[in-house]
Image (cartoon, helix red, strand yellow):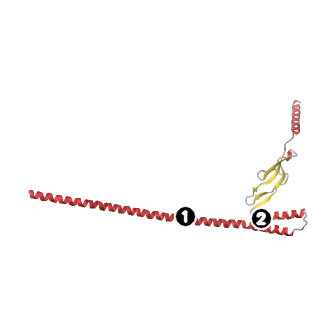
Amino acid sequence: MAGVSDAGTDGVAEGAADDAEEAPSGVAEHETADLARLADVVSRLGTEIEAHHARAAARERVIDRLHAEVERLRAGEQGILLRPVITDLQNLRADLLRQVRTLPAELSGERVAQLLESFALTTELALERCGTEPFRPETGDKFSPREHRAVKVVAASSAGEDGTIAEVVADGYRDLANDRVATAAKVHVRRWEPSADQVGGAEEAGKANENELEGSMDV
């Protein structure tokens, strides 16, 4: 019995020893698998980050290219819009130089005025091609803040002239697209300020009218 017990005890001890040797090996394999999975996740993350950076760089290149195209188109549109104006200015310059070379030694004031008016008309046509036309108010017109800009106030000779235009200093300009004033005309405006005698006379006339009214009521 004692021999059997010793043999059984030795077998159990050997089995326990084998289990003890196999346990660290199993844990190590499990940890190795975890590390492998972690390394795979990190690798995928690195790949995704690189792809994200590549896409961002591609977007930046597209944005830069589009910006360059917009600037090029904008410059082209400006050139197209300004081409008629440039042509008109070139023609005006040529006319001025030609007139200077052909001016007679003696030139009357009337002839000078005609030349200047012709140059002004050429400029006016150029402005119309750009969508704007000049307008000139008449002396005596009522002042309008929407269309006129008062650069000077002058005395009016009567109450009826108050708030009217005394002189036109510069033409205004109107936008042909919407028929609105783009640049107000510069004008001198009359202002009526009655004198002390006129104020006193008006007060006396008012009192006289009041007395007449009271007298008629008494009757």
User: Identity of the amino acid at label 2?
Assistant: Ala
Answer few, some or many: residues within 10 Å of disc 2's Cα (few below 14, many 20 plus, some between 14 and 19).
many
Kindly identify the residue that appears in the image at 36 percent across and 62 percent down.
37
Does the residue at mark 1 contact the one at mark 2 (Cβ under 8 Å)? no
Residue 136 screen position, x and y as percent: 82, 57
Residue 43 in which image quadrant: bottom left
Query: Tag 2's secondary structure?
Result: helix
Answer few, some or many: residues within 10 Å of disc 1's Cα (few below 14, many 20 plus, some between 14 and 19).
few
User: Identity of the amino acid at label 1?
Assistant: Glu
| Disc 2 target residue | 126
Q: Nearer the viewer, residue 186 or 39?
A: 39
Q: Quadrant of the C terminus?
A: top right
- For residue 151, which numbered disc appears in the image? none
From the viewer's perspective, is 141 left or right of 72? right
Residue 175 in which image quadrant: bottom right
Foreground disc of the pair 1, 2: 1
How far, Cα to Cα, is label 1 from label 2? 43 Å
Kindly identify the residue that appears in the image at 76 percent across and 58 percent down.
174
From the viewer's perspective, is 194 left or right of 8? right
Query: Tag 1's secondary structure?
Result: helix
Q: Residue furthest front?
A: 105
Marks counted in the figure total: 2
| Disc 1 target residue | 60
N-terminal-most mark, 1 or 2: 1
Kindly identify the residue that appears in the image at 79 percent across and 67 percent down.
93
Residue 215 screen position, x and y as percent: 89, 31
Figure check: 101 above or below 139: below
Q: Quadrant of the N terminus?
A: bottom left
